[in-house]
Each structure stands twice: as C-alpha cells, then as structure tokens.
Amino acid sequence: MRVCLTVIALLFALSTAYAGFFDNVVNQAEQATGKIIEDTVDSVINGDKQKADEQAQPVEDSQPTPANQPPPPVNDRQLVRDIQTELNNHGYNAGKPDGLYGPGTRKAIAAYQRDKGLAVDGQPSSALLTSLRQTPKTEVVSKPTPAPAVAEEAKQSDNLPAPIPVSAATPDAFTLPGCDAMQPWVASYKRGEMVQVTPRVEVASLLRPDLTTPLFGLPAERWTHDQFSSVYKKMIDCRNEAGKKDKTAFNQFHQAARGVSKGASAMTRVDRFRNRAAKTVDKILDHPASPELPKLVDAAQTALRGEDPSEALAVDPKLAYVAGDVKNLQSYCDYLTDEDRDALIARLEAGKGDVIAASAAIEKELADARKAVAEAPATPGGLQSLQQLSQAPVLDKIGMDEAAAFREEVAQRQREIRAELSRQEAEARAQAQAEAKRPIDLGQRLAQLIRGEDLDELSIGGLALEMPEQQAVSTLERDWKFEYKGGLSINNDFVATKPIFPLLKKERRNGGKVHLGIMDDGTLGQVHYVEYYKAMIVSTTPQAWLTKYLGEPDKVSGANGGRLLTWNQGDLHFQVLATNQIETVWRFADYEGQLTIALWSDDYEEHLADVGKRCDKLLEEKRGKGTMSESIWFGLNCGLAGGAKDHAGL
C-alpha cells in the first residue's frame, strides 16, 4: 500500500511538473515520500506493520507550515510593499517591493516570525509592519546565484537566516547517547523550526552545533551518513520504547526523528560540496606552474570570501579550465560553512608561496631565454641557437599568447641575422671579386723563385745548372711538392700535387710546369718554368725587381704582349717573360697572366745542336731500317721536321 502511494505521489509530481508547477509539486512529493519512508522504517524496526501504523500518528495534530499553505488574497498592496521593504532591510529576502504577495514574501514573513518568536502564519498585517519597524535593522548580505553545476542540488530556500557557527571537533569523537540523555534534546525541538547551516542549506533546529556537540561529541555538520542513520534508528527505538506510556515523549521523538531524517539529506549535500571544494582547491594548487597561476589562487580566495572574482579570470586559454575551477568554487560557497571556507582559504594561502616561487622561476627562465634571443650572434651558429630557443621548454609553461609573442621575437631576430649574413656574404663576394681582379705583383713570387746574387750562383727554386738529374728530381718532389706529369718520367716535365692546391688557389696561380733539360752526362743543362695567374700581372714588376737583384738586363725586347728580359754572363743565360697575352685555352680557364723563366748554359746549347744533327741524320735515313732504340730516341728528342725537339731559352 505504501509503495503504491509512493508511486502515485511521484507520478503526480511529474505530471504537474509538465504543467509548469515543478518546484511546488517536487516539494510536496518529497514531503509525502519522506513521510511514507519514515513510517515504513518504523514498521520494519518494530516488526509490526499494524502497530507501526498506529504509533505513527502523533497524539496532537500539528498545524501545517506556512510554506505549505496557499497564499490568501491580499488587497492592500501598499501594506505588502512596505512589509517587503522592511523585510529586505532586515536581511529577509522578500524580492522586489512590488506590493504583490507571493511565495517569496510569505517565506520571508515566516522566517522573520520564527526568529522573533511570533506566531508563524506567513501573512502580512499592520501588526507585522509595526514589529518590523520597531526592530533594529541589520546589514543585508546579498547571496550570489548558484552556478549551473550545483543548481540541481540547490533546492533550499533563498530566504534563510544568517549561517550559524560551526564548532571544531575530532572526527572520531562521535558517541551515541541513550534515550534519557536524548530526551531534553528532542523536547527542545519545535516542528518547523529551522536553522541555517550554510547560506543555502537549513536543517531542523535540533541539529545546531551547540546542541549536537555536547550530546554526541561531534557537530551534526560533521556526521557521516552511518552516524546519521544510527541517530535516526536510536530515536525510533526511543520513540517505540516510550509507546503509549508517554505520548508526549513518543510525539517528541517522532517529530525529532523526522527532522534528523531530513537533516541527513541536507548535511550530506554540505559534505558533498565540502569534498568537491577541497578537491577543487587541491586541483588549482597542483596545476603546473604558470605566471598567471598566482592570480588564479588569489581569485579562488576571493571567491571563497563571497566576493566576485570575475576580473581576475581573464587569463590565457591554457588556464581556462583553472578559471572554470575558480567559478565552480564560487558556486560551492553557498553550500559551505564559514569554517569550511576559512579552512580552504588557509589551504590556498599555505600553497600560494610555492605557486609564486614556481611562477617566478618561470619568469626568470623566460627572461633568460629572451636575453639569449637578443644576444644571438649574427652567425650560422646563432641561427641554430635561435631555432632551439623557438622550441624552449619554457614555452610549454607560459600562456599561448606570450609563447606566440616569444616566438615572434625569435623569428624577428632570425630575420635580422639572415639579413646580416646576406649582407656579409654580398660584401665577401664583392671583396673576393675585387681581390680576384686585383693585378698581381710578381715581386713576391720572384723572391720565392730566384736565389743567388749573380748568374754563377743563380738557381730557380733550388734548381741549379750542372745539378745531377736525381738531385733535381728530389728537389722538385721535396721542396716544390711537384711530381712527374702524368706519372711518366720520359719527358722530364713536373707539375704541382694536390697538397699545395689550397695555397695555389689563395695566391691565384696554377703552380705551373717545370721542364728539366738533361744533358748526356746526366746533369742539368736548363731549367724552364712557366706559370699562369687568375688576374692580370703588373708586367713592369719583374724588370724592376730583377734589376735591383741582378742589375740591368743585357737585353729588353717585346714578346707576346710583354717584356722579354735577358741576362748573359759568360756561358750562362737567364731570361724572364711576363705577359697578359696568353693562349686561348688558358683564358677559357679564367687565367689572365703568365710568367715564364729559363736558365741555361752554352753547354746545353751545344748539346741541343748535337741532338739536332743526329735527329736530322736519322730523319734522312729510312726509319724502317733503324733499330727500336733509335726510333724511341727519335720520338723523345726530335721534331717531326727534324732538329731537336727542345730548345734553349724562351
């Protein structure tokens, strides 16, 4: 039967809610369902359903509370308006003073009447207005609207008295007293008398901390669900024990048990929001360090003090969910006791130091990174360091806007360095081009090659006349870093090797070629050297330098666009030619100047004359009749038209 009544009550509540009266019907359904459940618990405890039904009826019928009465018609709008104004001035929220009597005004009047010990009917009257005007006014405390996250659970009246203080107690101090000890406590309870635990939660007055702490060792705000259940069951036991022997005690325990039952739900809600708020505070403090996090910690404290933290919540998108935690914390405040809020504020204050220190460390890390960006050198290495800075770990610790601004600083510095490097490269190219075109002064090169103060002592790079062939070859390989051209020794031609290529490039020359004229006795009869240069040479330099070194040349003549200088001393001869008119094949290779040197003796001229005669003789004879060795000799030493292939001088 009772289950059917429960279902009917709920169906009635839902159908009425669909019609637009959800709030009132839910309250009625909750009351009806609560009454049925309590009576059912009584019957289960007693083990006798019929007896429980009989005992569930109070001896004295109590009047319904004003909150459940329909509002009577009130025609005096001015009276209602004045009463609404006075109620608001005294801290009872009667809504806008519009002279219209509705549920809000009725609840405010009933709350005032309860607090002042007046008959509670929730009705406006001249006597009520007089009482209000004679009562000293109190400061009105506005109550923020709960956030959507808790709106479904916020079903308490907005028109509640100021919160009552909560006493500190040890969680394990709870004790369950006997019926005799509980009798004065339940006797003090008046049905419908409520006290405010938090700004949006009120419970039966017998659950006030000053009443529950001395009796149970723990204020009701700190009771667990099991402790509430044990108190409720004990009160039912006491009620049943009183039975019909003491109807007053029966009635008192019965009404008080109902108050405890309803208070358990309200206190559970408070405990739930207390836990949520504690977790939210820990979540804010445990968030990874960020420069803006201290501001959000301050905002959380502001919210817990009941103030609006909105101005401090304009933060980087990375911290948007932390700002959301602060908003949630603000919405929880109306379901927290003053003690809870003070404890959470203290916890935030205790953790703020670490948050500020971590934030300062990030700021310093960011400042150091910015300094490194500004001081990055205009080098390829500087560009590489900037690339690393654009991915610095500190960027994950700061806001997206600030990180974007830092990366823009890096990009700007990169652009500056690239522009500087381009300028340096262009300048270097210009200098290289200018250097490449700068005429070459052969004075330094001649100083490297020419040794000896006269022709008797003269040598070219250590190669002197009458030097044995093998010694000359060793000099070229050791001092000149030259080798046989093509690796073949048959022509006695030598060219530069790879180890000296960088030096040759720097000095803008190709290293040239050395030809050794070897006589029949195996000694050096002539040294012939030719070298090409990447720029035009100053053709007058050789004459000026050699004149100081060897004296005036014996002969100066024009040859191939340059000056052919000749020195003769006894049977020795020395010639130098510097010119900027070179063979086309060399000009295609970007060479523009040429230096040629020859040092020989009269003995070598005689040797070449003998070679020429033999070549002519072999040419006159039929080569097919000659020996193999003669044919090879002819190919190496003779020209196709006869005479010696080699010649003395230039």
Image (tube, rainbow, N blue to C red):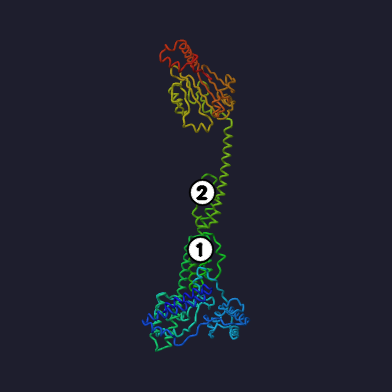
Query: What is the secondary structure assignment of the residue under circle 2?
Result: helix
In this rendered view, identify the residue nearer to me: 329 or 78.
Answer: 78
Between marks 1 and 2, how big is the CA–CA gap? Answer: 31 Å
Q: Identify the amino acid type marked 2.
A: Gln
Q: Position of residue 648 (x, y in %)?
A: 51, 18
Decide: is 50 above or below 568: below
Q: From this view, report whether residue 122 is shown above or below residue 428.
A: below
Q: Observer-nearest residue: 206 or 158? A: 158
Q: Which mark is residue 322?
A: 1
Q: At 57% from the left edge and 30% from the top edge, which residue is drawn?
A: 535
Q: Which mark is residue 387?
A: 2
- The amino acid type found where label 1 is placed reads Val
Is residue 180 left or right of 140 when viewed as pictured?
A: left
Q: Earlier in the sequence, mark 1 or mark 2?
A: 1
Which element type, helix, strand or loop, lies under badge 1?
helix
Regarding residue 38, the answer to whether it shows in the image is yes
Q: Spot the residue most to the right.
A: 78
